Amino acid sequence: MPAGKSMNVKVSSMESEMEFSITLATTGKQLFEQVIKTIGLRELWYFGLSFIDNTGQETWLKLNKKVKDQDLPKDLDKLEFNFRAKFYPEDATDELIQDITVHLFFLQVKEAILNDSIYCPPEAAVLLASYAMQAKFGNHQEKHVGDIEKDIEHGKVLPKRVKELHPNFSSEDWAKKISEWHAEHKGMIREDAMKEYLKIAQDLDMYGVSYFSIKNKKGTDLLLGVDALGINVYEKDNKLTPRIGFPWSEISNISFSGRNFTIKPLDKKAPDFVLRVDKPKTNKIILAICMGNHELYLRRRKPDTIEVQQMKSEARALTEKRQADRERQERERRQLEIAEQRARELEEKLQQAEIEKQKREQELKESQEENSKLRSQLGSVQADIENMERERAELLEEKENLAQKVSEGEMTKEEYNRRMIEIQEEYKHVQERLDNKEQEAETLKESLTLTKQEKEAELIKYQEEMERKLMEEEERKLALEQQASQFADENRKLQVQAQLAEQLRKQQLEDAQANQQQFNYSRPTSTVSNSGDANNHHQAEDHIEDENEVATFSSEGVSNMDSELNRVTAVAQDKSLNTKLKELSNDLNSVREQKQLSDNDKIHQDNVKKGRDKYKTLNLIRKGNTKSRVNEFEAM
């Protein structure tokens, strides 16, 4: 470690990096407290500071010891620690209180799934990715598909294994599939999306499990898994399906001596469960993880402390306020959508009215043209009538002249009679034509008058109606536009307030970090006397120093010890989601390259065929008495 009176420390959380300057007297607890103070975290019992020790092994910083006295790597100008979740809740959606706690767990679990530290089947990976996208982008929009595709290509959305398992499925195909699910989360706020992510992820077999290489008395290489529900034994090459399980409720105490680790059951008839590790230091780590998990297991089954009750009360108040704000924003959004829809409808009506007006004007124009044609036809008919009247007059005049010609002897009686017959025939013909033309003229006059009067009256009436409607629509449109503008202004104010609040939070974080960069720890280590202290489990596990340690597990005052046995997965509880995931699994199976199946893929498929899930397996491996399970372990 660096020489001198002070040390530079960098602490990386899942969302930020912090730098501190500490003294040689600074303890792990003081550094840890400063980190959680900077982050603004109160649910500190889940977290710890991890680092790579001088042997290259990842370990956890002990809070009761000075930082400089721990197995720090040598020849480093700056000490580096990771602020990570050390213990996991049984049910993240019920137990995690603060938004920052949910966010840190979300980021850590997501990273573990993406790098395959937690195995996740392809269909569940798509579902989880959709919640991650809701947390990142909010409600789905088409423009997000391209962003999701880019994130997929950079390994930020799906495990690399899932992509390799479906080589013919492009990043664009995955983005579209994820977007389909993303669209179904409309209206879900960021915090709820992260909780839904954890709700699904916590049912994965490897979630929250700390694995250690062990051996039984026969020397068989096995794995020990420690999690929130107890201790399980796995075959060396199968981290998904435990073979034997010991719940915390069955364990009396845990101890180690050298490389031997002993679990003493509550059942006095059962022999001790003894396992062996390669390094004594591993036993210290196992014991610390067991103690911390057992402590939280008991805490969950006891009444909440005053501090936790207060935190939950504050969280409920925040949730209620957030829900009220969300409902108000949703109401305003709907009202804005309605106003915008009405404005669009009014605009369409105005456009339709304008089209109708143009149509009527065209009809009037056509009517005027038709009238012009009628007048032209009437003029032609009237001209024909005048010509026929002249012809008739000429025949009558000729008839009178013929009688005079006969009296004067210019025409014989026979010629007169013949000509009179001709004149009468011609007169009759002319009169018939004249009657027809006069009838035609009357018809044209009637048509002309009717068309003109009707069209003019209709147009006048329509124009008056249109002017009235246009005025009404314009007034309504103006009112709706004012209303929409008001809603938009209110939404902008809310967005500005949210941005200012986020900026203030970031500024406070930056100020806290800046103030602590020059902070020198010189305070003495505080003594924990209250058994309800939030980090009491850290104090207990940090006192593991000797090569022989014993931790006694008491369940006094604890109820509902084996409640996890009645638990079912979130997917199994939601029939609709279960059906859709099965359909997605079938779709993906059609494009799956079977040769690319990993060992975990094959194990998972076998478990699915057998109808197993995390909790069904848990029930199965706890069957029988403790003695029979210890014997089974020794026989492995």
Image (spheres, grey):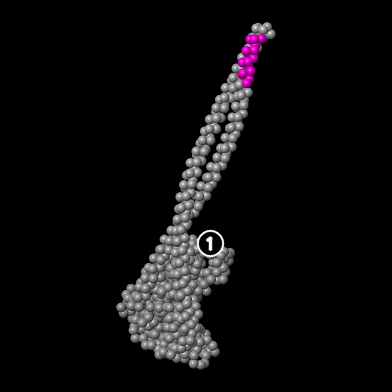
356 up-or-down from 234: above or below? above
Task: Mark yes or no: residue 74 visible.
Answer: yes
- Residue 91 x, y percent position in the rendering: 40, 72
- Residue 318 x, y percent position in the rendering: 39, 71
List the residue tagged with mark 1.
142
Dominant SS of magenta comes to helix
> Residue shown at 66%/9% (left/top)?
405
Does the magenta segment cover residue 391?
yes
69 up-or-down from 616: above or below? below
Q: Outermost residue toward the right? A: 410
Does the magenta segment cover residue 494?
no
- Residue 492 x, y percent position in the rendering: 47, 65
Query: Which of the pair 295/410 is nearer the observer?
Result: 410
Q: How many marks?
A: 1
Query: Which of the pair 200/412 is nearer the observer?
Result: 412
> Residue shown at 56%/37% (left/top)?
367
- Amino acid type, mark 1: Glu
Quadrant of residue 613 in the image? bottom left
> Residue shown at 57%/39% (left/top)?
366
Helix, strand or loop status at disc 1: loop
174 up-or-down from 408: above or below? below
119 to the left or right of 264: right
> Residue shown at 55%/71% (left/top)?
155
Q: Outermost residue toward the left? A: 557
Quadrant of residue 216 in the image? bottom left
- Residue 285 x, y percent position in the rendering: 44, 83
The quadrant of the image that shows the C terminus is bottom left
Task: Mark yes or no: residue 302 visible.
Answer: no
Q: Residues within 10 Å of mark 1 (few under 14, many from 20)?
A: few
Which residues are the magenta region?
390-405
Quadrant of residue 47 in the image? bottom left
